[in-house]
């Protein structure tokens, strides 16, 4: 059977688990409604160029992790390795900026990255993300961050760290880059091979290398905050002030750079102590030039994405009990042929009246049916055998109290609804 296992880095999410996914997704959708985000759904794959040009050719995602394929006609396509570029592409394609001055959208999307699988890192994962287009107001940075923090708390994660940084803009970055290159030049031998390559191609990324030797060598490296222009400095000060006012704790991490080249100004990441190496449960930032780079009018923007898979791992590790609804409120156990037929009728009647109900289709004994009802988490079991049919009644068992009583068939729906 091995050849039919799910491909490496992917997983089957089974019914016992999907309930949790749905719960978290519904909390997310409710929060989006509260904050005025509307859903956008973009294709699972896009033209390869969209990602290569706009995420940064030297980023890990573009240089190593994309699932690329070619159509018969020779067009190069890529399974989306993140949700921001496709959302911006859709924003530009449909000129959404002409519809509203500020557009706020959210998505729940499968994301594909050819990474080395490990706990919390998959080749297919799900991201819940939001993006806001059309304003440079630092209050919006604070809103997006407070949305994220509020969402984590709402689902039951109250212990996380919010890391915050500014990574400047094209105006101020060159000066920092120069200082960083000067600083590293004499220390190149101490860096890992990847960072030596980054030195040439994408120096900023050296700052958040996870290798100990690089961290040690770069402890005193020049950081962006000391080089930002007045506009970026001002913006960052206001974001921090808003967050403080909103009572959202954060730690300044002047080495946080994030994994894509499109970011400008504010960058942030949420990390959970419950996860191992893959401890980022979400991250985002501003990307004020991306809309223009993708072909739209200059439009500042900000967003964030969180990994649903990792969020659920965190909830499990914290042993958070999610308020999940039992799947079937009522299980109808029919005994014998007549009981089975009556059960079919009863289940139909319950469902017609909006009561979730299910029954047995395998001709099991009452004891076996009760076991199934238990597994399904039924609140009530309706038992119908020959005696019940003769008296036009049903036997109702309350699974939480184990109490059993007889009811006229005609009163069943009302009785259950009243509970
Ligand atoms: P990202 O930091 O690459 O940002 O991904 C966001 C989140 O997705 C991560 O914090 C992590 O929780 C989760 N994640 C990433 N890769 C994996 C993986 N291989 N397995 C499981 N979970 C993973 C972005 O993708 C940006 N588009 C976010 C953004 C939106 N920035 C602005 N707007």
Image (cartoon, rainbow, N blue to C red):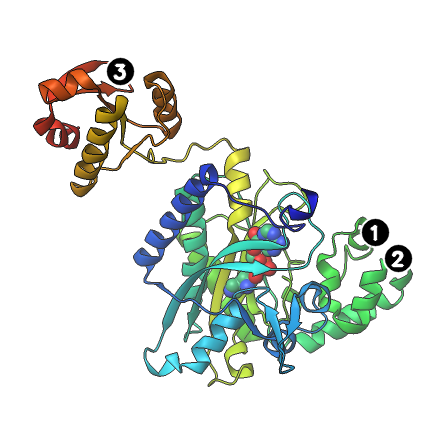
Q: In this view, does 139 lie above or below 122?
A: below
Which of the two discs, 3 and 2, labels the residue nearer the N terminus? 2
* Residue 365 in the figure: left or right of residue 204: left
Residue with the mark numbered 3: 401
Residue lying at 60% horizontally and 60% vertically, measured from the top left: 112
Q: What secondary structure is found at the residue carrying circle 3?
A: loop
Task: Please indicate, yes or no, whether residue 99 appears anywhere in the rendered image.
Answer: yes
Front-lying residue, 363 or 256: 363
Which of the two discs, 2 and 1, labels the residue nearer the N terminus? 2
Which of the two discs, 1 and 3, labels the residue nearer the N terminus? 1
Residue lying at 35% horizontally and 28% vertically, measured from the top left: 377
Q: Position of residue 314 (x, y in %)?
A: 54, 39
Residue with the mark numbered 2: 190
Decide: few, some or many residues near mark 1? Use Cα within 10 Å; few <14, some 14-19, many ≥20: few
Residue lying at 59% horizontally and 55% vertically, measured from the top left: 124
Q: What secondary structure is found at the residue carrying circle 2?
A: helix
Decide: few, some or many residues near mark 2? Use Cα within 10 Å; few <14, some 14-19, many ≥20: some
Measure the alpha-carbon separation of dots 1 and 3: 62 Å
Residue with the mark numbered 1: 213
Does ligand 1 reach within 8 Å of label 1's beta carbon?
no
Residue lying at 61% horizontally and 67% vertically, measured from the top left: 167
Does ligand 1 reach within 8 Å of label 3's beta carbon?
no
* Residue 349 in the figure: left or right of residue 125: left
Q: Which of marks 3 and 2 is in front?
A: 3
Q: Which of marks 1 and 3 is in front?
A: 3
**Which mark, residue 84?**
none
Measure the alpha-carbon separation of dots 3 and 2: 68 Å
Furthest residue in direction front, as rendered? 337
Front-lying residue, 2 or 323: 2
* Residue 190 in the figure: left or right of residue 370: right
Residues marked 2 and 1 touching at CB (< 8 Å): yes
């Amino acid at each position: 059977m091995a050849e039919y296992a799910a491909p490496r880095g992917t997983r089957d999410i089974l019914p016992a688990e999907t309930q949790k996914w749905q719960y978290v997704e519904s909390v997310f959708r409710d929060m989006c409604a509260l904050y005025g985000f509307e859903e956008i759904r973009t294709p699972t794959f896009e033209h390869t160029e969209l990602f290569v040009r706009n995420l940064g050719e030297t980023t890990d995602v573009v240089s190593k992790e994309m699932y690329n394929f070619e159509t018969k006609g020779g067009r190069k396509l890529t399974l989306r390795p993140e949700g921001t570029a496709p959302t911006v592409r859709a924003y530009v394609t449909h000129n959404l900026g002409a519809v509203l001055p500020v557009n706020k959208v959210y998505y729940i999307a499968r994301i594909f990255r050819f990474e080395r699988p490990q706990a919390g890192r998959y080749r297919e994962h799900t991201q819940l993300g939001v993006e806001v287009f059309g304003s440079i107001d630092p209050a919006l940075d604070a809103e997006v961050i407070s949305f994220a923090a509020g969402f984590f708390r709402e689902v039951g994660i109250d212990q996380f760290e919010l890391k915050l940084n500014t990574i400047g803009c094209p105006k101020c970055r060159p000066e920092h880059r120069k200082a960083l290159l000067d600083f590293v030049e004499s220390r190149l031998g101490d860096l890992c091979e990847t960072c030596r390559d980054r030195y040439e191609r994408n120096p900023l990324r050296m700052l958040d290398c996870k290798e100990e030797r690089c961290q040690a060598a770069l402890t005193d490296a020049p950081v962006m905050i000391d080089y930002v222009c007045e506009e970026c400095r001002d913006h960052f000060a206001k974001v921090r002030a808003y967050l403080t006012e909103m009572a959202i704790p954060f730690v300044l991490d002047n080495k946080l750079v994030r994994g894509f080249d499109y970011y400008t100004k504010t960058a942030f990441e949420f990390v959970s102590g419950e996860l191992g190496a893959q401890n980022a449960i979400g991250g985002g930032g501003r990307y004020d030039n991306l809309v223009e780079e993708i072909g739209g009018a200059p439009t500042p923007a900000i967003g964030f994405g969180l990994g649903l898979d990792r969020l659920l791992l965190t909830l499990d590790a914290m042993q958070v009990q999610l308020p999940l609804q039992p799947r079937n409120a009522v299980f109808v156990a029919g005994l014998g042929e007549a009981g089975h037929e009556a059960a079919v009728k009863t289940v139909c009647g319950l469902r017609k009246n909006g009561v979730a109900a299910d029954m047995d289709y395998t001709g099991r004994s009452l004891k076996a049916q009760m076991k199934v009802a238990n597994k399904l988490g039924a609140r009530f079991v309706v038992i119908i055998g020959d005696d019940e049919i003769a008296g036009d009644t049903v036997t109702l068992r309350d699974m939480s109290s184990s109490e059993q009583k007889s009811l006229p068939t005609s009163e069943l729906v009302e009785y259950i609804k009243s509970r």
